[in-house]
Amino acid sequence: MNDRTVKYDDPMNHKQRTIREQQIAFAEIDLGQPDRKLTEAFVVVPESSEREVDWRQDFRYVSREQQFVQQAREMEWKAEESAEFVPFQAYWPTYEQMHPGQLRWYLYWRAEVRSARYPETDLSYLFVYLYELIHGIGWREPAQGYELMRSVWLAYRDRYPKLDMYIREWQYDYGLVFGLELPPAEPLQKLPRTLSEELREQEWKRRFTAEPLALTWDMLLPLIDYDIEKSRFYKGQGRKDLQAYAPKVVALVDGYLAKTEGARLLERFMPREKKVSRHLFRTAVYNHELYGRTIPVSVLPVSGHLPLRSYLTQLVRLTENRLREFTGFKGKLRGITVEPEVDQLIYRFLHNELEQRRAEEAKARLPKVKINKAKLSRLQRESDEVRDMLIIEELPLVTRERGLEAFEPSPEPAKRSRGTSNRKAVDPRQAEMVFEGFMDLESASVQAKLQKPGDSEDSRASSDPVESYSDGMAITSDLSMLENETLSEKLNDALMENEGMELPQEWQELLSRLSEAHKKMLSALLDGEEAAVRVGIAEQAGSMPELLLDEINEISMEWIGDLLIDSDEIAEEYRAELLSML
């Protein structure tokens, strides 16, 4: 029952296993080296002719920024005499991303920019050039590098507005690195979202220290702890009024505190400066081994100072309450605490502003006086005709033999400019003969009219010559008076037609802004005077004709919204107004 069953291997299987082990041993011995002992150490000795390896220099990591600086130094003064523009657009552009045609254009364009010529190019080329300036490529002194950066910015900022948000930050970092006293940057009307904290606080500080305080609505809004955009008054009728008057109220209170207390808003609620670590040349291809990654900066935290924010919030809320009151909007904001004198100051200011605006709106609704240009031209033409009738161009020679011949006018009346007359000179002897003949004819005519029927020739011959002369002069005077009365009637009729056609307000303002030199220049243009006359007018005023014409056009653009002078001539549609003005 308990006997164990012992199994023995087959003799044939044992023999095959023995042969296989021998074959394996033979293969291992055959692949080895029988002349060398298996336990002997094997060492490879390098040849003495190989160079030594510097592991730090030959196997160190070279960043993309470091490689850019190396290539920039190699190509610092390379230039192309001419090249064809090739478009280039890339994020964080470098030389590696340019193909040969783009690189040739960049070297040509960079040489032009260094010579103060600014051909059209792509934005990516601009960034590569700015990266070079940041790393000291292309300039000898830091101030020179700053001017190059500023000049290329001003040359291309109109075409590429996004340059503003980059170069403004890089110029600030550049000044910090080299310790430059940079001129104040251009004021911002609105703070971009991407603007760094240091530049935001710097801009607020500059606004609060300006004289007078110069805050816009967009710059005031982040400084108040009141979500004014949820206000019913703001969402309704008060948006424009709050945006217009809230910054003015803050500036008004700032000036009032400066006069009464000797301390402005920022001086009254002055925060403490704090030190922050600023990252250099963010968003640029920048090798931080050159100037470091960060730099300490002192910042005045205007926007984060709670007492200042609280006071500004109260001023804005009080402004909204007063505007609600003046515009008839129901409801008021509660919990406003400001000084009573400040409250009265704001009340008087807003009351005056709104009253003045209502008066201007009422004035604008009044009908404007319009001048009938056609009627004015007709009046001027009739006046010229009456004047021409009264001017004797040329007196004919009258003698006793010719008798009463008609004084025929000149077949072609002389052309006269405004205010001048081209009368022909009359010989004195001819004038004397004309006068004598005229007086004789007049005397004869008077005697014929005064002679009674039945009078003899002797009685007529014996009449008093002095009396005849006096009667003739009286009749001549009557004729002249009749002509004058006719002229007066025409002029009175013209004045009656033109009555009530006074110049509009804007033309009156325009006339008041013009100097005597401007008026003389306009008169010369109206009269068609030569260029020499205009030069003389300008020389008397210590100027040049072109400058006077430009000044006249600037004034006219301001008050009537159009140019009076085009190509050294008065605009045809404004000749009538200028004639009536001058």
Image (cartoon, helix red, strand yellow):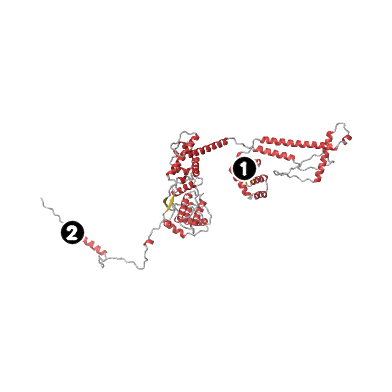
| Direction right: furthest residue | 458
Q: Position of residue 17 (x, y in %)?
A: 20, 59
Q: Which one is nearer the viewer's eye here, 48 or 504?
A: 504
Residue where numbered disc 1 is placed: 512
Tell me if residue 164 comes above or below residue 70 in the rendering: above
42 horizontally vs 272: left or right: left
Q: Tell me the mark number nearer the camera, choosing from 2 and 1.
A: 1
Q: Which one is nearer the viewer's eye here, 42 or 31?
A: 42
360 horizontally vs 338: left or right: right
Residue drawn 60% across the image and 44% down it: 555
Q: Which one is nearer the viewer's eye here, 460 or 123?
A: 460
The residue type indicated by label 2 comes to: His
Q: Residues within 10 Å of mark 1 (few under 14, many from 20)?
A: few
Tell me if residue 574 comes above or below residue 92 in the rendering: above
Residue where numbered disc 2 is placed: 14
Q: Could you tell me how far apart the alpha carbons at marks 2 and 1 are, in whole angstroms?
A: 133 Å
2 and 1 marks in contact (CB < 8 Å): no
Residue drawn 78% across the image and 37% down it: 477
Is disc 1 placed on a helix, strand or loop?
helix
Tell me if residue 491 comes above or below residue 425 in the rendering: above
| Direction front: furthest residue | 261
Q: Position of residue 248 (x, y in %)?
A: 50, 42
Q: Residues within 10 Å of mark 2 (few under 14, many from 20)?
A: few
Q: Is residue 240 visible?
A: no
Q: Is residue 377 visible?
A: yes
| Direction left: furthest residue | 1
- N-terminal-most mark, 2 or 1: 2
The residue type indicated by label 1 comes to: Ser
Which quarter of the picture shows residue 461?
top right
Q: Position of residue 79 (x, y in %)?
A: 50, 59
